[in-house]
């Protein structure tokens, strides 16, 4: 298995996919949810079947026209809007009520208010959580690989792969934000941190084998040692990823609607993490080694 000879193709593929996602991010695809912006959220259940599009049309020309409406399945809808009081909530329900074909009342499952101050605190906490996780990963890998020459390169390669997976997840959600009104909320951050952990874990499986082989085969070119390490760990990484992917797909297809964005983050992160551990992290090390020898 000669993976390293195709590293430029891997880098080009990742560049194209990431560029596509970044374009959608620039178009405003990453839509912060109520947890980050503040406002009101209302979860309702209609007595009969309806669609998000019908509800959006019912709100056109009113003060609620800019509200985000999402279908949670089984005639349950999530509506996010500006900060409203009880009277405005009743007005919103009355606008939707004519859509029902029966005389049964619309059920209000939840009504929440998030102040801008709490939302701002959530943004700050999310940033520091991601920063602390990334810094801890960098320092730990540097320390864990201290027995091989220039251990910092393993930390750098892992963080680049981590950044790759991060942008993949953000890019996919930017696309979904444009077309399906997906929003970034605290559940997204939880799943995002889980992806960070899985991405590093996947890379470490390969890099740890590479560390052992570098010590054992000290006279062999790094690209050959990388190919050997990938061959030795490929089956394990692929089997683990497929097993987890089947589980996540089952949860996505048969779980609750509110869990789907959370599960989707994990699925995208899982696929990207498996790919980056083989095609990005290890190939960064090969590229680094080739550049060092060329410079010398």
Image: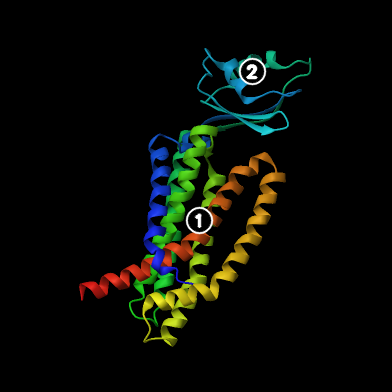
Q: Position of residue 151 (x, y in %)?
A: 36, 75
Q: What residue is drawn where x is 64% and y is 17%?
A: 90
Residue 272 is tagged as 1
Secondary element under disc 1, as helix, strand or loop, is helix
Q: Position of residue 292 (x, y in %)?
A: 26, 73
- Badge 2 density bin: few <14, some 14–19, many ≥20, Cα 10 Å: few
N-term mark: 1 or 2: 2
Q: Position of residue 48 (x, y in %)?
A: 76, 23
> What residue is pinned by disc 2?
90
Q: What residue is drawn where x is 73% and y is 32%?
A: 74
Q: What residue is drawn where x is 49% and y is 49%?
A: 169
Q: What residue is drawn where x is 44% and y is 79%?
A: 211
Q: Is residue 152 above or below residue 169?
A: below
Using the rendered image of the protein, determine whether residue 135 is visible from the camera's viewpoint. Answer: no
**Disc 1 vs disc 2: Cβ atoms closer than 8 Å?**
no
**Disc 1 vs disc 2: which is toward the camera?**
1
Q: Position of residue 87 (x, y in %)?
A: 60, 17
């Amino acid at each position: 298995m000669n993976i390293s000879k195709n590293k430029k193709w891997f880098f080009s593929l990742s560049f194209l996919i990431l560029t596509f996602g970044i374009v959608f991010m620039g178009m405003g695809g990453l839509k912060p949810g109520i947890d980050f912006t503040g406002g009101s959220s209302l979860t309702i259940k209609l007595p009969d079947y309806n669609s998000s599009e019908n509800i959006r049309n019912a709100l056109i020309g009113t003060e609620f026209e800019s509200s985000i409406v999402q279908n949670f399945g089984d005639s349950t809808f999530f509506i996010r809007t500006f900060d409203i009081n009880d009277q405005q909530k009743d007005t919103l329900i009355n606008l939707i009520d004519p859509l029902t074909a029966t005389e049964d009342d619309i059920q209000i499952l939840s009504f929440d208010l998030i102040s801008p101050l709490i939302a701002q605190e959530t943004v700050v906490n999310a940033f520091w959580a991601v920063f602390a996780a990334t810094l801890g990963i960098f320092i730990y890998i540097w320390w864990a690989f201290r027995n091989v020459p220039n251990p910092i390169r393993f930390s750098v390669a892992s963080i680049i792969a981590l950044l790759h997976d991060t942008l993949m997840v953000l890019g996919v959600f930017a696309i979904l934000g444009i077309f399906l009104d997906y929003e970034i909320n605290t559940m997204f951050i939880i799943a995002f941190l889980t992806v960070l952990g899985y991405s590093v874990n996947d890379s470490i499986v390969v890099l740890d084998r590479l560390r052992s082989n570098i010590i054992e085969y000290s006279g062999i070119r790094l690209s050959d040692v990388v190919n050997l390490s990938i061959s030795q760990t490929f089956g394990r990484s692929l089997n683990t990823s497929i097993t987890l992917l089947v589980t996540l797909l089952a949860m996505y297809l048969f779980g609750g609607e509110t869990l789907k964005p959370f599960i989707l983050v994990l699925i995208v992160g899982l696929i990207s993490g498996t790919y980056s551990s083989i095609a990005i992290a290890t190939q960064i090390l090969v590229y680094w080694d080739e550049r060092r020898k060329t410079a010398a």
